[in-house]
Amino acid sequence: MKATLSNLLRQMRSYPSAVVGSIIILFLIFMAFYAMVAIPYGDAIRLWRGADNVWMESPRNAAPAWFNLFYREKQPTSIIMRTTDDPNLKQVVDLGGGVATTDFVFEFDYQFDGFPTEMTMFFDAKFTASRPNVALKWITPDGREIPLADLSVRASENYSISQDTRVQRRVGGLSPEKGLFADPANPNKVLKGTYQLVGEGLVFEEGSSVDASMVIYGRVHGLAGTDHRRRDITIALLWGTPVALAFGLVAAVGSSIATMFLGAASVWFGGWVDWLIRRVNEVVMILPLLPILIMVGLFYSRSIWVILGIVILLGIFGSGILSYRAMFLQVKESGYIDAAKAYGAGSGRIIFRYMIPKIIPTLIPGFVTQVPSFVFLEATLALLGLGDPVLPTWGKLLNDAQTNGALLNGHFYWVLEPAFLLMLAGFGFAMLGFALDRIFNPRLRGI
């Protein structure tokens, strides 16, 4: 066995397509294991559903951060500052009688060429009856002070500066996220320099406190960008890998092995067994797979495991059974089969010990090249809105992109990233499968 595997690897190294295909598949396997270790299944579901407002500090529809390498004008990344992370941002002065000032200053250097997309303040306050009060103002690099709001803060408060019409009037009718950063001499240009967002807070009870977070949402974010719900697309790209590989490999291996066993049984036993398998095969071959899966998704379940079971069940009696039957008819007439019958070998031993091992070399290239078709099938169902509603997958990304007009709105990364991984998976398995076909079928080596 060890010598056979060593010989196979040696032959694969002589085929560049096998080497490239193997590298791609190993890369996808690494991605799959990394996703399951770095982001456990439960966390992936929670993150993709956006539970507990986990994406509130992420920009909406932001391109990947590495796009800045190709932009002439550098687009802003998100700027996030919290008093809970840096106590130096907040200064508390006790005035006695339960009254205290809580002032905070968020100072940052803005050197980007583009304007941010949104600006929001988040407050967390502790009090019994009297709410803390916070007055906000904006200080530009040229010394201008622009009042923002005077708030009575609840236990959890979000103040969207971008949606405040009073701030919009104060900056000359521009949207706040643009007007607060605009150069007074040229409103279409960013005034670069050091900005400050100053908050002057006041609490009225013993033990009361207020913490603040400032989020200036950028136009680029993360490794893969974000979608319309602020979710990091990296989550779906990573977790789509184990889902795609599991679906493709299980469907391909399961249907191939089961089909091979049925083909062997059909040839060896003949009679009514062969007749029954052939009739079922003829019926299944005329059944359209995709419409059946669509009906299952619409009327029964969209679970990926239910879909996988249907795919394997229909694949068992597919056209592949005719190919295996033709090969087993030749194997059945071999001399060593007659020798096995002569010394009294049973049907099970002949099928599993003598017939099936003879054609396994043809099985391996076949199921390797089948994997991409099942990967694309899962993505197609998800693209049609019939994918698993729980799992983040490549097809689900494409469906969300289509539903929200990603291409029409210029969010090309949202479509290209999952599409690239789908094509990469198909390319890798196809190249490896074709090389294995030449290795196991000597008649193809000269082609």
Image (cartoon, grey):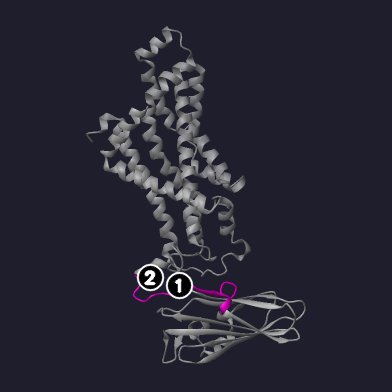
Quadrant in the picture for residue 149: bottom right
Q: Is residue 293 magenta?
A: no
Is residue 330 rendered to the left or right of residue 247? left
* 398 lies above or below 220: above
Crowding at label 2, few (<14), some or many (≥20) Cα neighbours within 10 Å?
some
Q: With respect to residue 249, does 37 lie above or below?
A: below
Task: Residue 89: name its quadrant.
Answer: bottom right
Residue 269 visible (yes or no): no
CB within 8 Å, label 1 to label 2: yes
Residue 159 is situated, as x and y percent measured from the top left of the image, at: 61, 78
Q: Which residues make up the magenta segment? A: 70-88
- The correct choice, above or below, for 245 with respect to 208 in the image is above
Q: Residue at x 41, y 51 (%)?
A: 422
Q: Which residue is mark 2?
A: 68
Q: Residue at x 60, y 46 (%)?
A: 301
- Quadrant including the N terminus: top left
The residue pinned by badge 1 equals: 77
Quadrant that contains the C terminus: top left
